Amino acid sequence: MTNADGGAPVKSLFVMLAGYNAWANRRLYDAAEKLSNADYRADRGVFFKSMHGTLNHLLVADRIWMRRFTREGDHPDPLDAILFNDRAALRAARETEDARIVAYVEGLDDEPLAGRFRYRTVTNPRDIEQPLAPALAHFFNHQTHHRGQAHAVLTGAAPSFDLVLFQRETGLGLDA
């Protein structure tokens, strides 16, 4: 599977996004560690209330999608589950999941990326079949969406999560 113009394979885009995801999560967790416990757990009006709730949701959603993609791993339920109350344990689980995501994407080839997959939804249970590549795009976009909410919680102490900064630091996405 290649881009519409016949250029670089779509896989390179997802490899870049998986690397970006891990990079942005490290930056997010570094900043969140500087919050007091009260600020970390305070309801700030974001979808999952607090920084703690948002970080747990990101891990929950990633595990749900990775289970869908790979048929392996945990499938937490519900979407607002608190998988880890301990901040260090949550970070360790995040790093493990990010490594799993990177390995999964790096292991993909053209056939599965051009193919379809089936899964069951969580909030309104039903079976869905859809192409894999657009689902992966949603997967990475969802992470960015909630990292944006976490960024708002951090306010002035928030690091940049700009994709272009990641590209400049790593070189991923600069070669076409």
Image (cartoon, grey):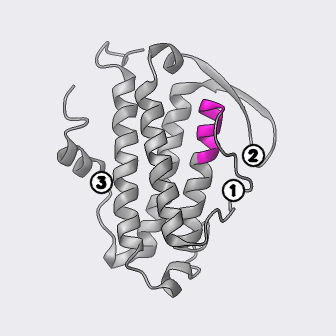
Q: In this view, does 26 lie above or below 120?
A: below
Kindly indicate whether the residue at mark 3 contacts the one at mark 1 (C-beta within 8 angstroms).
no
| Magenta region | 63-71
Q: How crowded is mark 2: few (under 14 residues within 10 Å), some or many (20 or more)?
A: some
The amino acid type found where label 2 is placed reads Val
Residue type at numbered disc 3? Asp
Please name which of the two marks, 3 or 2, marks the residue nearer to the observer.
2
Pointer 1: what residue?
Answer: 79
Tell me the tag on residue 164.
none
Please state which of residues 99 and 51 is positioned toward the viewer in this rendering: 99
Mark 3 vs 2, N-terminal side: 2
45 relative position to 71: left or right: left
Magenta: main secondary structure: helix
On the image, the x and y values in percent for residue 33 come to: 40, 74
- Residue 122 - label: 2
Secondary element at tag 1: loop
Answer above or below: position of 110 versus 106.
Answer: above
Where, by quadrant of the figure, is residue 30 drawn?
bottom left
What is the three-letter code of the residue carrying label 1?
A: Leu
Marks 1 and 3, how far apart at CA: 26 Å
The residue at which mark 3 appears reads as: 162
Q: Which of marks 1 and 3 is nearer the N terminus?
A: 1
Residue 157 is situated, as x and y percent measured from the top left of the image, at 32, 76
* Residue 144 belongs to the span the image colors magenta: no
**Quadrant position of residue 106:** top left
